[in-house]
Image (cartoon, grey):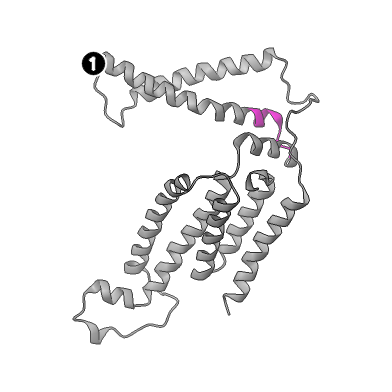
Amino acid sequence: MLERWNPTVKAFTVLVCVILLSFEYLVSLNLLVLAVCLLLLVFCSRVSLKKIGVILLPACVAAFGLFVMGLYYARGGSTQIVDMSSLSAMPYSVRAAMSQNLYTALQLATRLLAYAGLGILFALSTEGDFFIASLLHQCHLPPKFAYGILAAFHLMPGMAREYAQVRTAFAVRGLKMGPLSMKPVFTMLVNSVRWSESIAMAMESKGFCGEAPRTYYTVPRVHWYDLAIAALMVGGVVLGMLFLNL
């Protein structure tokens, strides 16, 4: 179902939810948004659990880093200050966890996870070609930019293969390269420029023109259920802001 959701409506819905979350510091709301996004991906899309976990793992690591930073270095938390002078014999980590910084750390970490959940919801349930076609028809993106983005998008797998082949060629010749060596990257970019020129000439030879009227193989449309899902998501965030803040 998420794959059928109009990508433009989905993108604006995610953007509005992100903006709304930026005005609140509710840990419960952030966790609720993350849980809803994950449940939608699991039960309403074709995305595998493994793929969700692999992409969510870096966000969890970053959230843990923000949690530790907020726990030890935050100032001016949202909770009442506790006098810790009588607990000076306890380890600093225990005293920090009992101080006002704990809630601030949870706010930072859960907000990042909520943003990650919304981003993953959009990225994993949206096909690149369908998204560009939606921008072309719903947002009136000029065809030159739309087809240029599509050409670059489909060129990326070829660039990855070219990079691997260049590294193999250097290894066969006995040239040692580190993981951050720029030699294979430079060769890959030179070949990519040649490919882009060939693609441009091919489009021109086929009569491509951004201003001329044309027909389209795929024409995305905005249906009632696209707007209904958007209203439910935005309305849910607004209701969470109102009732969880009481």
Left or right: residue 143 compared with residue 101:
right
What residue is drawn where x is 44% and y is 51%? 56
Which of the pair 75/164 is nearer the observer?
164
Which of the pair 58/176 is nearer the observer?
58
Looking at this rendering, what residue extends furthest in the right direction? 213
Residue 93, quarter of picture: bottom left
Q: Is residue 74 visible?
A: yes
Say if 41 sits above or below 167 in the image: below
The part of the chain drawn in magenta is 140-147
Magenta segment, prevailing SS (helix, strand or loop):
helix
Q: Where in the figure is residue 166, as x and y percent of width and height? A: 36, 19
**Secondary structure beneath disc 1?**
loop
What residue is drawn where x is 74% and y is 28%? 217
Locate the C terminus and report the quarter of the image it occupies: bottom right
Q: Is residue 26 visible?
A: no
Q: Where in the figure is residue 125, as x and y percent of width and height? A: 59, 45
Q: Where in the figure is residue 5, as x and y percent of width and height? A: 68, 47
- Residue 112 lies within the magenta run: no
Which of the pair 33/11 is nearer the observer?
33
Which of the pair 18/6 is nearer the observer?
6
Callout 1, which amino acid? Answer: Gly
> How busy is the neighbourhood of tag 1: few (under 14 within 10 Å), some, or many (20 plus)?
few
The residue under label 1 is 174
What residue is drawn where x is 66% and y is 37%? 130
